[in-house]
Image (cartoon, rainbow, N blue to C red):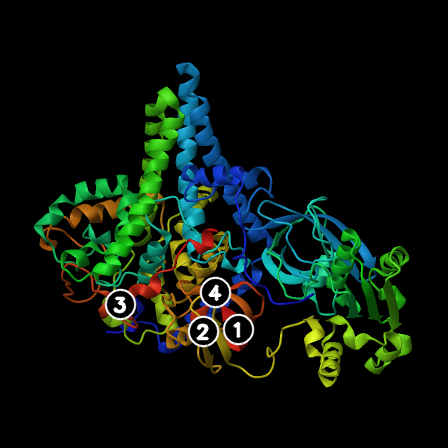
Amino acid sequence: MFAELVSSDTRAPKQGTWERVRKGADKLTTPLLPDDYLTLLNPLWSSRELRGRVEKVIPETDDAATLVIRPGWGWRYQHRPGQYVGIGVDIGGKFHWRSYSVSSPPKRSGRTLAITVRAMPEGFLSDHLVNGLEPGTIVRLATPSGDFVLPDPPPAKSLFLVGGSGITPVMSMLRTLDRRDTMSDVVLHYASTTPERMIFRSELAALHEKHASLTVHEWFSDDQGIFDLAGLDALAPDWRERETWACGPAPMLDAVEAHWERHQIGDLLHLERFSLQLGTDGGEGGAITFRNSLKEIEVDGATTVLEAGENAGVGMPYGCRVGICHTCTVTKINGTVRDLRTGEEFNQPNEQVQTCVTVPVGPCTLAI
Amino acid sequence: MAIADVQEYCHLTDTDVEAIGRELDAIRERVEQARGAADAAYIRRVIRTQRWMAASARIGMIVSSPLEPRYRRPILAASAISLGLAKILENMEIGHNVMHGQWDWMNDPEIHSSSWEWDTGQPAEQWKHSHNYIHHQFTNVLGYDNDIGYGVLRMAREQKWHPVNLGQPVYNALLAGLFQWGVALHDLDLEAIRTGKKDPKEMKRQLRQILKKGRNQIVKDYVLYPALSGRQWKSTLKANATANVMRNVWAYLIIFCGHFPDGALHFTEEELEDETRAEWYLRQILGTANFEGGKLLHIMSGNLGYQIEHHLFPDLVSNHYAEISPEIRALCEKYEIPYTTGPLYKQYGQVLRTIHKLALPNKMTSDDRPPTGKDVTIEHGRLHHEDRQERRTELGGWSRTKEGARG
């Protein structure tokens, strides 16, 4: 799943003795942290940036794979079923970040975390994750986030509408229901272009075998065409009463959203969109949100992010103002900015940008 | 006077200047494109090496403390040298370059200009202001660039002589030995404090930062590690002091060879007026000096032997300076611009000569470098933030808390 990355402010609710000892030892390692030296021994022995080691890459279909990741220190197995996690991968010396739904259920045993990724056309990172990632690779992780989650206990009756790799957050929910043995009356409608591209097909069949209350409808759009939502009446006549989770490509979600609105049951619907990359093409300029200062400003495509921040009254760091000194560098949490010098666009989440020589392209959020 | 009036540039037409700018931009672009996995591997390797050197030095001092002197002493000596070299490597090739943003392209928050804190007295934030901004933007402009003599030494004939300058040989030796603390106070601008021009709030903030950083550094090297060595605490303390002095003298030497050898010119503020990007490039070339040496020497000096390349492209990865250096040199030859370089001993010899000559009034000594302009004299002290171009008065814009970045 591709979604907005949220920074890891919510980490570390309580500290163990070992962590306190480690923190105390920083008087010996200042200005570095003990973790900076411990990673010399084991790359996972640091909680400064969350890390994980790719243990296994399991092919699911021709173009999708599940990455089993062993998280390092600082990781808490607290994700809620359906949430996504940020993963940062070093490609060509540079960290690229994306978010993917966690497909494994939350649990401490096993000490691993799984995400399932489909290689998208033009999806440079997803392709690398599916086809280029060697077991043993160290990746960076961001804490899980997202509101597309299953409550505990689950609703008595639920409906899942899934298109393509939108299955991943739903799989985490179904696995959780299975593991906790709380599988209620669940209907899953799962559309894929072909049976071969359907991720987790056999596992879903097995879950259905095990839990009679789980119904799985498969839909193959290459043969059957796009599923008409009017067909829901035949599929699950009580769909209006079911709490519904929908995840899939944008046109599908737009149709689902409109359908639920039409029946005035929008409050029963939860949506997870593949892409929040809205507004990145077309017009220049945009609304800049300064997250820590709680300020926002709308600027045109000729106003640098630095000027925008100053106009909004944010204490922006700055130096030479011509792109030399890097004093003005700030973390961009999401959105796209364009470098005025080269025309290069920076559209990665959690990316460091030089505010004095970049302009916003669509809405973006900065950590300052 | 514009930069084109500087004697070394008189023969250049505006078209030439712009052409030089374009050629340099093209080199910059090429290096930016070439950055990749090999460069990331390089800096990670340097960082790993440096941390192993530091860690083994610290451990060596502790574990050797109960041993007999004939075993203990060689381990102690090796540890002190290893620690000194680790500090040098950290300050020069890692810290200085990371804080310039050379490695920001990796998008790795652990190796990033916004979060790097280095193993020396000066807080990173103040360094980024005094060095990245003041020194690199106003390189060698009299009254603007605080690095001309660091407010301690008279390094330009245009600076007015004062009897206090007679002590220069002594100040110079003190500065070399205590360099990290001199640097720590650099951004405070003691001159401004003395004349009451410093914003007291900003001064307090900076002082607090310096005290906190300085305390951590001192406690680490002179209290905690000696304490861990038990009865041999004195040896560890001495070893750590040796390592710090090693680093101080080396950093001083390298930095002084960047702008004080004879070929490096000074400029006046008139040259800043309407300065174009290409003219800024020219000023960097003319105001800076390289030194020659082997690969190891260059790594241990943070590739500042390629000071000219560094000043042209302060945020390009340092491990590429060597490869672009012949191109810059050829460009200088093509346009008949001086490209100052020489062996390290020769460059430092010129620096020493200048320090000693300028302890005396101008009329008692001869000039070794091309004059900056006719009868240029500036008063003691620095111009202040309010007087600088494109500055805003509130310096709060500089403050960035490090807590967030450090988890």
The span from disc 1 to disc 3 (Cα, nearest Å) is 49 Å
Closer to the eye: label 1 or 3: 1
| Residue for point 39% across, 15% down | B69
Residue B293 in view, yes or no: no
- Determine whether the residue tagged by mark 1 lies in a helix, strand or loop: strand
Is disc 2 surrounded by few (<14), some (14 to 19) or many (20+) residues within 10 Å? many
- Of all chains, the one bearing label 3 is B
Q: Same chain for marks 3 and 2?
A: no
Q: Which residue is mark 3?
A: B7
Measured from the top left, where is residue A129 in percent x and y? 71, 58
Q: What mark, if any, has residue A305 been given in the picture?
A: 2
Residue B329 in view, yes or no: yes
Q: Same chain for marks 2 and 1?
A: yes
The span from disc 3 to disc 2 (Cα, nearest Å) is 40 Å
The span from disc 2 to disc 1 (Cα, nearest Å) is 10 Å
- Of all chains, the one bearing label 2 is A
The span from disc 4 to disc 2 (Cα, nearest Å) is 12 Å
Closer to the eye: label 3 or 2: 2
Answer with the quarter of the image where residue A211 lies: bottom right
Residue in the foreground of this view, choosing between A132 and A171: A171
CB within 8 Å, label 2 to label 1: yes
- Determine whether the residue tagged by mark 3 lies in a helix, strand or loop: helix
Q: Which residue is mark 4?
A: A367
Measured from the top left, where is residue B25 in percent x and y? 47, 68
The span from disc 4 to disc 3 (Cα, nearest Å) is 48 Å
